[in-house]
Amino acid sequence: MQEHGFSSGLKAGASIAIGYFPVALTFGLLAKTTGLSLIEATAMSIFVFAGAAQYISLSLITAGVLPALIVVNTFIVNIRHFLMTAALNEKMEPDARWKKALYAFGITDETFTVLATQQGDKIRTSFAAGVIVISYGSWVVFTSLGHLIGASLPGFLQASMSIALYAMFVGLLVPSMKGNRKVVSLALIAALFNSLFFFTGWLSTGWAIMVSTLASAIIVELISRKGVAA
Amino acid sequence: MGAWFWWMIFGMAVVTYIPRAIPLTFLEGRELPEAVQSVLRNIPYAVLGALIFPAVFFIQENVWFGVIGAVSAFVIAFTGANVILVVLGTIAILSIYGLWFG
């Protein structure tokens, strides 16, 4: 095994796979109650692979919203990925465009955070492939399973597992926070902006995450250039 | 669902893929201005802050699930545990909490 290659990627992606388990299971179940067949529900997870957008599409289908508008909404929800993949590009090893176009399909909020917080210089394409394969596998398989068994987990486990992805984000953030005021400020300011947008309802979730992130990244950069922080 | 459903999936797939693929392929081999690079390097930590808060508090109707979960995750992470232990440990704590008070 080469260092930081495919198997290391699988390991690094394992927490995403655990976190996707309850979310995908519930998606499969909700898709069934919305009236999607097993094939239709699974196909959505196979071709779209975007948690938030898929959930929203189910509620829009139920509300009888025009399919074209559901597509437009999906785009709006996912615009934040422009920012994430631009940032990720700085971390990835240079590689053939077709390979990058291939793994780009697997960049979600979760795979992005796992990849972008890796220590060290450049991330190898094979490492990214490992992270994506295990996450995507979990998302697709558990969507089908949720539809097939038509039930979610026992109540207490469903509730406790709903923390998984957030616990993962915390686990990725904290090691970089220690002794690094810049990282603490970045996370804190983005969290404050996002909370503001949430509680005032000024922006919907997709936009709120993008605007908070960008605002925080720019503000902290301006401050650290003046030598106040960093 | 009818044929419209498959057209919708196709449309959703395309508009989800575009924001993921364009930066990664278009920016390959291009050097961005230093200031832009610096801001982009800040993005991952800012994203984490925005992804965690305030959503973590609303994972269940009972807001204490999120509060206890978030505190547990931060405490476990600060001991130096790796990510998977943070995830499993936090789930374990919330399972115990849920069984007792849920």
Image: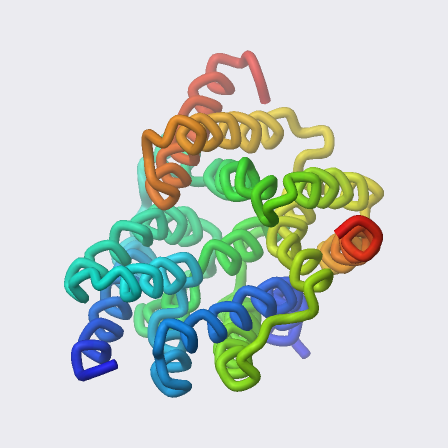
Q: Residue at x 48, y 52 (%)?
A: A91
Position of residue A165 relative to residue A206, above or below, is: below
Total number of numbered discs in the rendering: 0
Q: Residue at x 36, y 59 (%)?
A: A53
Image quadrant in which the N terminus of chain A is located? bottom right
Depth check, front residue: A229 or B16:
B16
Q: Is residue A205 left or right of residue A192?
A: left
Q: Residue at x 37, y 40 (%)?
A: A210
Q: Is residue B102 left or right of residue A151?
A: right
Residue A19 x/y as whole percent: 61, 62
Depth check, front residue: A195 or A89:
A195
Depth check, front residue: A19 or B37:
A19
Q: Quadrant of residue A6?
A: bottom right
Position of residue B77 relative to residue A133, above or below, is: above
Residue A54 x/y as whole percent: 37, 64
Q: Quadrant of residue A182?
A: top right
Residue A56 x/y as whole percent: 35, 58
Q: Is residue A120 visible?
A: no
